[in-house]
Image (cartoon, helix red, strand yellow):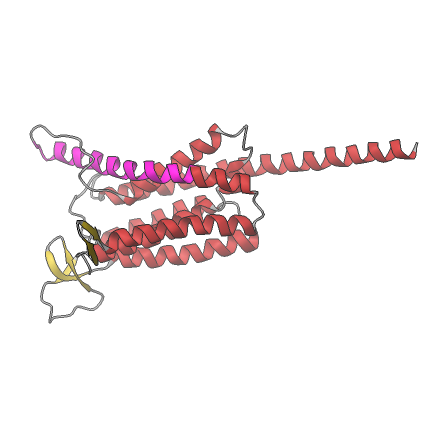
Amino acid sequence: MLPYPILVLGDIKVYMYGLMIAIGILCCFFVLFEYSKRLGISNEYVDFAFYTGLVAIIIGFIGSAAWQGLFNYIDDVKNGVSNPKFSLQGGITAIGGLGTGALVYVIGCLAFKKKFPFSLTKTVTVAPCCMIIAHAFGRLGCLFSGCCHGELLSSVHSEYVFGGIWMQGTNGWGYYVPTQLYESLFLFTLFGVLSYLVLAKNFKYSLAVYVGSYGIWRFIIEFFRADYRGSFVGALSPSQTQSLLLIVLAIPAFFVMRYFVKKHEEYLANTVAVAQTNDGVVTNENQE
């Protein structure tokens, strides 16, 4: 829709894609601080989540390029390209970036579990909401730049096709199925639902819901997408293959979070019991 720079300052060019990414990241950290405050998470844990999340975002972008580079390399091998090479300059894939970033965040929580005990149960509840809002704005960026679109419906501007949006896509200007818009709307809706569950119902399994529901949605809309990368496993596109992986990973994500939630609840119960015992001892000593 807007593949051209919206602002030019000398050699600096600002695109809607980059602007949407920037807005998404800002919203991500706003949600982190606001939701953490509402849930009563201490500033110490919020700061830990912020810096760990910042590292996860940076490595996530590298992971998105590496994941796409791997798929490009495998595709070149399958097509018999002579001397195929792995490159980080062949584009990025959202699922690869989200997966890498989430993995880095979880590893960070586990690595500092002694200094920040139960950081997973305290911050991972909020983290998916942060990721979803950033993801939603990122897909709007894709819509403006004309990437990740659906099938070409018509290349004649005067012949509007219902459900299509005029944009510059892989096959030039035309009416394309706006799969980026559909995905963005889904993510904004999911953000609203999970925000309600987390803030109003103290829901602990938002990560599993995000991973599983997004995998299902992405798998479905890929049938309407014109993926130039072709099939990867059987008749499935690379993104559909990754979507199935997300759906499968949602199951262990649920049980892992349930394990940590139970451990946290046991820890809190023991802490309360010890505190009550100590209060009783102090009271008896005062009475004596």
The secondary structure that most of the magenta stretch takes on is: helix
> Percent from the top left, x then y, of residue 2?
20, 59
Residue 212 colored magenta? no
Q: Which residues are drawn in magenta? A: 52-81
Residue 70 colored magenta? yes
Residue positioned most to the front: 10
Residue positioned most to the bottom: 158
Residue positioned most to the right: 288
Snapshot quadrant of residue 90? top left
In the figure, is residue 136 to the left or right of 68? right
Q: Residue at x 13, y 52 (%)?
A: 170
Q: Reply above or below: 78 against 41.
A: above
In the figure, is residue 265 to the left or right of 151? right
> Percent from the top left, x then y, of residue 284?
88, 33
Pick the quarter of the image with the N terminus.
bottom left
> Percent from the top left, x then y, of residue 165?
20, 64
* Front in this rendered view, residue 223 or 169: 169
In the figure, is residue 267 to the left or right of 61? right
* Front in this rendered view, residue 111 or 216: 111
In the figure, is residue 281 to the left or right of 142? right
> Percent from the top left, x then y, of residue 131?
39, 47
Q: Residue at x 9, y 28 (%)?
A: 83
Snapshot quadrant of residue 15? bottom left
Residue positioned most to the left: 82
Residue 174 can be seen, yes or no: yes
